[in-house]
Image (cartoon, grey):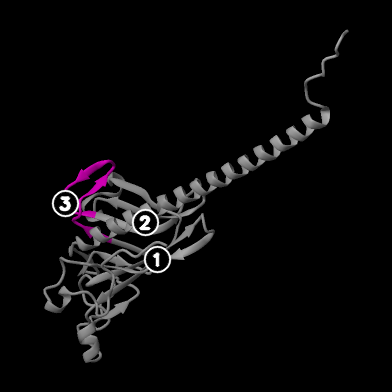
Amino acid sequence: MNTKRPEIGFTLIELMVALTILVILLAALYSGFDAAQRAWEEESTTQKAESALRLAMDELGSELRSAVADKILLDARPAPYFFGGRDSLRFLTADPAPILGELVPGIVEVTWKVDLDDATEERGLIVERALPQPMQPPEERIFERVEIAPFVVRLGLRYFFYPPVPEDDAEAEEGAWTDTWSPEEDDPMLQPNRLPEGVEVTLSYFDPARGDTITLPPQYAKIRAKSSLVRSKRPPAGATFEALGEFR
């Protein structure tokens, strides 16, 4: 007597159900992996931007603290080599800086500003370093341009000083702020013929992870080699710029 064995296998409906479940699981796994990958890339970009900002603030602060009070002749009048605008700054510093990959001893001219990158068409904080113009012909000038902090969209600057003729006792004690500092200013009542006491720096940068522009707390760098006034040995009254502010 022949006994017919039952057939072992899957029906078409069972295969379709299994494939459907497998596709759903793969789609869920891919979605989770893709989200994790995007989050990691955004976090990595944010960390790189923050590191660049910290490096920029450290370098700018170091160069400002080592600013040199050398003077140039403007209309036969000696004036400090310090050109401070609202969004750019050019001065001489004794802080060692690389020029074309080499450390050049002595005084270096530095320019800090926000500029547009021709390749990426994105704004960023750059520093230009060169031997001072009075010491080198333009055609022989050693020059270096470095983008130090990408995504920076604004560099805000203010200059702190003690007026030679203060308006009142409060200004004499606490000092004053100005938006620009130019050697072309020859009115000592508006601006003394020397370097400022210090510079307040405010950076704004675009955070690609958030899709928004973030303005960091202002930082204050005191210029050391410039004044013999006892009162200039402290930061402005009420200033809290010693520690670098949080980026988040």
Earlier sequence position, callout 3 versus callout 2: 2
Q: Position of residue 225 (x, y in %)?
A: 15, 65
Residue occupied by mark 1: 216
Earlier sequence position, callout 1 versus callout 3: 3
Span of residues in magenta: 91-108
Earlier sequence position, callout 1 versus callout 2: 2
Residue occupied by mark 2: 53
Q: Is residue 9 left or right of residue 248?
A: right
Residue 45 is covered by the magenta coloring: no
Is 11 situated above or below 221?
above
Is 78 situated above or below 186?
above
> Which one is in front in this view, the residue at disc 3 or the one at disc 2?
2
Q: Position of residue 4 (x, y in %)?
A: 86, 14
Disc 3 on helix, strand or loop? loop
Of 74 and 17, which appears nearest the observer?
17
Asked whether disc 1 touches disc 2, contact meaning CB atoms under 8 Å apart, the reply is yes
